[in-house]
Amino acid sequence: MEDLSFYDQVYQVVRLIPKGRVSSYGAIASYLGTRGSARMVGYAMNAAHTAYPPVPAQRVVNRNGMLTGKFHFGSPLLMQQLLENEGIRVENDKIADFKKVFWDPSIELEM
DNA sequence: GAGGTGACTGCGA
DNA sequence: CTCGCAGCCACCT
């Protein structure tokens, strides 16, 4: 962890998100200890597409369950398609059953 | 070394 | 109810 950059830490957590589940920037930020700095998580995702293995950034949405970063997928519809492909229902650019598919690392990965 | 940026969040009006 | 503002911190130029 300490050897990894903040970006890498975010990538690892995001990759731990189970299929059919989603998480929020704030939840990840909180888990990484940078609570209140959800921007850093989002900013890290900005370079996520340059990371390898690829990061399932489509599983990371804002606190409202809205696909705020869909425009960074190259195609605004790509993010929604990926989520729907995993069984997640997306309506009006936001997760329909957000509370049901929400995955909080600080809870799921709780010690 | 300093300044600017941003895939967010929470609170106030 | 919706809209706006300030705080937050790592990375890039």
Image (cartoon, coloured by chain):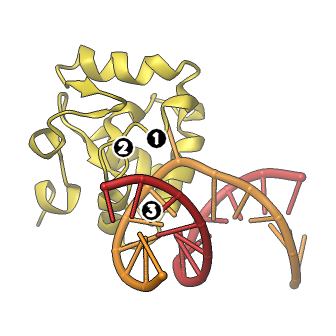
Chain colours: A yellow, B orange, C red
Do the dots labelled 2 and 3 sit on one chain?
A: yes
The residue singled out by tag 3 in the image is A38
Work out whether residue A19 can be spotted.
yes
Is residue A34 visible in this depiction of the protein?
no
**Chain designation of label 2:** A
Marks 2/3: CA distance? 11 Å
Q: Which residue is mark 2?
A: A61
Q: Earlier in the sequence, mark 1 or mark 2?
A: 2
Residue depicted at 37% across the width and 30% down the height: A93
Q: Label 1 is found on which chain of the structure?
A: A
- Is residue A65 rendered to the left or right of residue A98? right
Q: Which amino acid type is marked by label 3?
A: Ala
Counting the numbered discs, the total is 3
Residue flagged by tag 2: what amino acid is it?
A: Val
Where A50 sits versus A41, above or below? above
| Element under disc 1 | loop
Q: Crowding at label 1, few (<14), some or many (≥20) Cα neighbours within 10 Å? A: some
Q: Tell me the CA gap for discs 1 and 2.
A: 7 Å
In the depicted view, which residue is nearer to us: A95 or A56?
Answer: A95
| Chain of the residue under the numbered disc 3 shown in the image | A
Disc 3 or 1, which lies upstream in sequence? 3
Please name the residue shown 40% across and 36% down the image: A67
**A104 to the left or right of A71:** left
Quadrant location of residue B11?
A: bottom left
Indicate the position of residue A82 as horizontal and vertical percent values.
34, 19
Q: Nearer the viewer, residue A111 or A57?
A: A57
Say whether disc 2 or disc 3 marks the residue closer to the N-terminus. Answer: 3
Quarter holding the N terminus of chain A?
Answer: bottom left
Coordinates of residue A54 in the picture (x, y in percent): 46, 28
Name the residue beneath numbered marker 1. A68
